[in-house]
Amino acid sequence: MSDLATLNHVKPASPQLPVSWYFDPAIFQLEKELLFNRGANYVGHELTLPNVGDYRTLEWEGHARVLVRNAGGIELLSNVCRHRQAIMLEGSGNMRRIACPFHRWNYDLHGALIGAPHFPQNPGTGLHSTPLFNWNGLLFEGPRDPNTDLATLGAAIDFDFSGYRLGRTMIEDYPTNWKTFVEVYLELYHVDPYHPGLGNFADCGDFRIEYGDNWSIQYIAAKNGFARPGTPGYGPWHEACRKYLNGRTPKYGALWMSYYPNIMLEWYPNVLVVSTLLARSPALTTNVVEIYYPEDIVGNEPEFIKAQQQAYVETAIEDGILCERMDRGRRALWERGLDDRGPYQSPMEDAEMHFHEWMRRNLPASVASA
């Protein structure tokens, strides 16, 4: 538990980022090259492809790549035909081979070209494949290896997806900078005054934080055993959690983890969430959210899922509004040539400060010292 007796003690504001970093195209380009392109980039979970022949396209990339399970495991292949560059598959399903609908070029489950109608010889141009890392079933393309980055994560056991199934995928665009979204996710200072539903579910007065070089995780206690919901939207979710606890004390109210720069993992009772932020431009961020539940809940408890998603979306909408307000204020300062860097509330904004320090370490010294 953090010592909230230090509520009025704040740290110097120097690590907070300049407002120009949220709008300057040059800074954004550096972030793409030095943070995202050198990170561990999540592409999907192995649970979504249980059988040989299963495939799932990356919708947020315009279906340009596809995860495919073959006899050797799961591969990430280009989904663009090598002949006339058409997108071949969309969505998910099962297949014996990848067939382009344009000219019927066929590829096997490893991406090798096995058929090109009316060509006297096989042109031999297979689909590009990207190597993958596997951490707890989460699949990442490199270059960073999450198994190295997360080797000291104490909560790895809590993010065990064994026996879980994907219940829902949500893809939402936010007209804000990606860093603003991360900051709102990381800091606990706003939860009680801004999120009456979430604030009466997770106790942000009872938490601890664990850090790694490229991640942080916040362990949040349950608020009074989920006894009193803060909003009508959270009422069914409180009831569902109490039902499945059957009188037991909840292990946590929530785990909120950020794997920098853009992966967020969340734990709630009988729920695991993976969120991936895609930085489209300085003022546009896409959030890809996957929500997983135990198999028995997916198969038999639609009311549990409905209750959880209702509460989750309520908080997501509130966070989206807050992100927009922050970006609007920062943009107003930036357009007037002004800057402002408020202090951190410690310990409630310590994880946000850790993220800002990580940003400065991973951008050029000439930029980070600005």
Image (tube, rainbow, N blue to C red):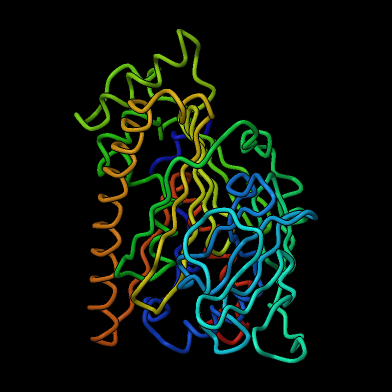
| Residue 339 in the figure: left or right of residue 255 | left
**Is residue 194 toward the left or the right of residue 132 in the image?**
left
Q: Please state the horizontal and vertical placement of residue 169, each as a whole percent of the image.
A: 42, 50
Q: Which residue shows up at 26% across the image and 64% down it?
A: 324
Q: Quadrant of residue 304?
A: top left
- In this view, the residue in front, 2 or 224, is 224
Q: Which of 170 and 126 is in front in this view?
A: 126
Give the residue furthest to the right. Answer: 72
Viewer-side residue, 44 vs 250: 44
- Estimate the x, y position of residue 157 in percent, counting from the top left: 68, 34
Q: Where is residue 145 in the image (x, y as percent from the top left)?
A: 74, 61
Q: In which quarter of the image is residue 119?
A: bottom right
Residue at position x 59%, y 50% in the image: 216
Q: Where is residue 333 in the image (x, y as percent from the top left)?
A: 26, 79
- 294 or 5: nearer the viewer: 294
Report the side of 163 relative to 250 (left or right).
right
Q: Seen from this angle, which residue lies furthest top?
A: 247
In this rendering, the count of numbered labels is 0
Write the residue at 29% across / 87% down.
337
In the rendered view, would you say 88 is above or below 365? above
